[in-house]
Image: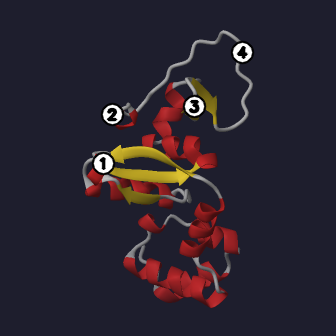
Amino acid sequence: MKITAEELKAIYRGMSDEELMSLDRDDLTDVALQVHREELGRRGLDIESEVQEAADAEEMIALHSFDSIDEARSAEAMLESASIPAHLENDTLRGRGFRLMVPASMVEDARLALKGPAAIAETDAIIVSARYEDGVFVPLQEIDIREGAIVEVHVQSSDFGE
């Protein structure tokens, strides 16, 4: 069944701002994407500026480094479609590739978004993001972990000392 632009306009007009902004733009046809942009404009809403405002509001953390700009852009697009602010930093001069940066508070959500829904179902473990400071891993968010708990630490090779 083919939906016309006029039918899409009526559907989008009936949505709340939150519903409209949460639509996965990667799933929209060209016509639907155009109607979506028009409705956002009519309401004075701008997804890109909201993503940027969130990114500016807190510290950005390197989630992953990519050797290929295409892979990096693909991961960035996946996060943006999941409403997770992200941007790329070109750190190839220091041999760190293209770094995918996300807000510190959204690191866990970003990792899960990149792994997909199957990753959540495969384990009951949680991901705790931490910064290595003075020989100790310090969680970025307050979390209650039992004393003596065994943890697994994944460090990107680009983060090892030179």
Mark identifier at residue 146:
4
Q: CA distance from mark 2 to mark 1?
A: 10 Å
Report how far apart the C-alphas of labels 1 and 4 lie in the structure. Answer: 38 Å
Residue 44 lies left or right of residue 99; in this view the side is right
Say above or below: 71 vs 141.
below
Quickly name the residue at label 3: 133
Q: Amino acid at mark 2?
A: Glu
Of labels 2 and 4, earlier in sequence is: 4
Counting residues from the N terminus, which is met first, the one under dot 1 or under dot 4? 1
Say which label, 2 or 1, has the lower sequence index: 1
Can you give x and y, in whole percent of width and height, for residue 48 in the image? Answer: 54, 73
Q: Quadrant of residue 146?
A: top right
- Relative to 41, say whether 128 is above or below: above
In the rendering, at what x and y percent does residue 160 appear?
A: 38, 31
> Residue 64 is drawn in which quadrant?
top left
Mark 2–mark 4 CB contact (< 8 Å): no
> Residue under circle 2?
162
Q: Earlier in the sequence, mark 3 or mark 2?
A: 3
Disc number lying in front (1 or 4): 1
Of the 4 image quadrants, the one containing the N terminus is bottom left
Question: Of the residues tagged 4 and 3, which is closer to the observer?
Answer: 3
Which numbered tag is attached to residue 94?
1
**Distance CA(mark 4)–CA(mark 3):** 21 Å
Residue closer to the observer: 93 or 73: 93
Give the Cα separation between the discs numbered 2 and 4.
Answer: 34 Å
The residues tagged by marks 1 and 3 sit, at their Cα atoms, a distance apart of 21 Å
Residue 86 vs 129, above or below: the answer is below
| Residue at x 70%, y 21% (from the top left corner) | 145
